[in-house]
Image (spheres, rainbow, N blue to C red):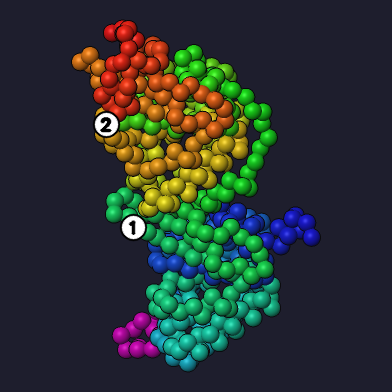
Amino acid sequence: MNEEKVRAKKARTGVPGLDDVLSGGLAAGHVFLLEGEPGTGKTTIALRFLLEGAEAGEKCLYITLSETEQELRDGAASHGWTIGDNIEVFELAPAESLLDADQHQTLLYSSDLELGEAITKIFEAFERVKPSRVVLDSLSEIRLLAQSSLRYRRQMLALKHYFARHGATVLLLDDRTSEANDKTPHSVVHGVIQLQELAPDYGAERRRLRVSKYRGQKFRGGYHDFAIKTGGVSVFPRLVAAEHRAGFARSLLLSGVPELDALLGGGIERGSSTLILGPAGTGKSTFTLQFVFAACKRGEKAAVFVFDEELGLLFDRAKVLGFDLEGLRDSGALHIEQLDAAELSPGEFAHRVRRQIDTPGTGTVVIDSLNGYQAAMPEENSLILHMHELIQYMNRQGVNTFLTVAQHGLVGDMKAPIDVTYLADTVILLRYFEALGKVRRAVSVIKKRTGKHEETIREYRIGDRGLSFGGPLDEFQGVLRGVPTFVGKAAPLLDR
């Protein structure tokens, strides 16, 4: 059976990114479980699932045991949605008379009678509407009514067989407030989507989801970050670089500075990654901007993602060096974005990068810096894995990637907070060194996978014309340690 026919049997959720995780959506005619603690976005996803069906002309039913119909409509309106005629909201709640002080029995109090009455009302609503999509919110109320795990499992099986017999695609919501460790629904339903909310020590909450079960269907495993914003939920599927490969011609790209190109053995090969490593103030961002400016002059587009510097300051500083970033941005040649690591998940960041790469003509991407990106990661090991996939993806799209890492210290022994040198194809090392009573800068290329490079160390200067380079410092020893020893007869340093 071809892919089109398989997808024709899927009920798309309408949630950006979630259908990709589910390989097309929910298998039509089956029952699925969407579980997560309160506030993880279950109702928002469920409403979007029904709205997607309603837009396709399907009849939909939302059965609520925990929220009122007005609360649901208000929640939908907060995202700019309207619950139309194709979506019936059935509010299964005690009648107003039962709220009288003299009345002690309500529909939501556990008893054999109340459980049977609740299930009967659910079936009656279904028979009346005859929907093809159903949301039941939530199982916690059914679990409380059932009182025992045996009765709860029997009711779950009864609901499953009833809905399956009528060919409806059903989404059961479970907030896990009554029995957090109860796995009864997992064994009954066709698939399980788990939502989680994480609270970092600093910054906004992080949300992620995982498909833990999907019978007879491949899906994208692992955790996937998602965000709830005005307009609904957006899921950022975990990036798998091996799934993406584009054909492109390998060629050497120049920086526009002959001495830098000579250091790099003639330039940077298209579809490779370059790491610029050095302490604060050595000009790592300036090096990346040199490559960005050269790419734009070639007629390509570039994207710069800045974690560490305010854009206004960056624009002013770059203009002094001869780089008109605002002009490039306004012309459409440059996309530049300032990111807040405290408000951004790694999955969303990868999604933003991919969106720019998908823009026709984008050939250069800068991430400045990985120190800021690390702040968005809960663990260093996860950062390495995320960066590996992201770099490999960009390499396979023929994009040149430039990464910066700020090392701790100024001179002498340097330590980087993260070691990604083995991931990059080219590593450019920047250093301070002291000579003749002045602090100077030196650059060397310590790694290049794609060809030969100079093994020399050159002094460089950052001035009003950008980067300027001197000759190889072949008459000094110990430049990279910060305090070199002069062993020559001439004075090869740049004239100040």
- Using a 10 Å C-alpha cutoff, classify the residue at mark 2 as few (fewer than 14 neighbours), some (14 to 19) or many (20 or more): some
Viewer can see residue 363: no
- Using a 10 Å C-alpha cutoff, classify the residue at mark 1 as few (fewer than 14 neighbours), some (14 to 19) or many (20 or more): few
Q: Earlier in the sequence, mark 1 or mark 2?
A: 1
Q: Secondary structure at mark 2?
A: loop
Horizontal arrangement in the rendering, residue 408 relative to residue 161 (left or right):
left
Q: Is residue 388 above or below residue 40?
A: above
Horizontal arrangement in the rendering, residue 151 relative to residue 432 (left or right):
right
Residue at left offset 67%, top offset 58%? 57
- Judging by the rendered image, the residue that carries numbered circle 2 is 412
Q: Give, as a three-letter code, the residue at label 1.
A: Ala
Q: Nearer the viewer, residue 440 or 362?
A: 440
What is the quadrant of the C terminus in the image? top left
Kindly report the distance in space between the C-alpha atoms of the residues bearing marks 1 and 2. 38 Å
Q: Find out whether the residues at labels 1 and 2 contact each other: C-beta distance under 8 Å.
A: no
Q: Is residue 446 above or below residue 200?
A: above
Viewer can see residue 199: yes
Residue 428, how many percent across, how many down? 43, 28
- Judging by the rendered image, the residue that carries numbered circle 1 is 199
Q: Nearer the viewer, residue 418 or 389?
A: 418
Specify the segment rendered in magenta: 92-106
Residue 399 in which image quadrant: top right
Q: Give, as a three-letter code, the residue at label 2.
A: Gly
Residue at left offset 58%, top offset 46%? 241
Residue 174, how many percent across, how many down? 47, 72
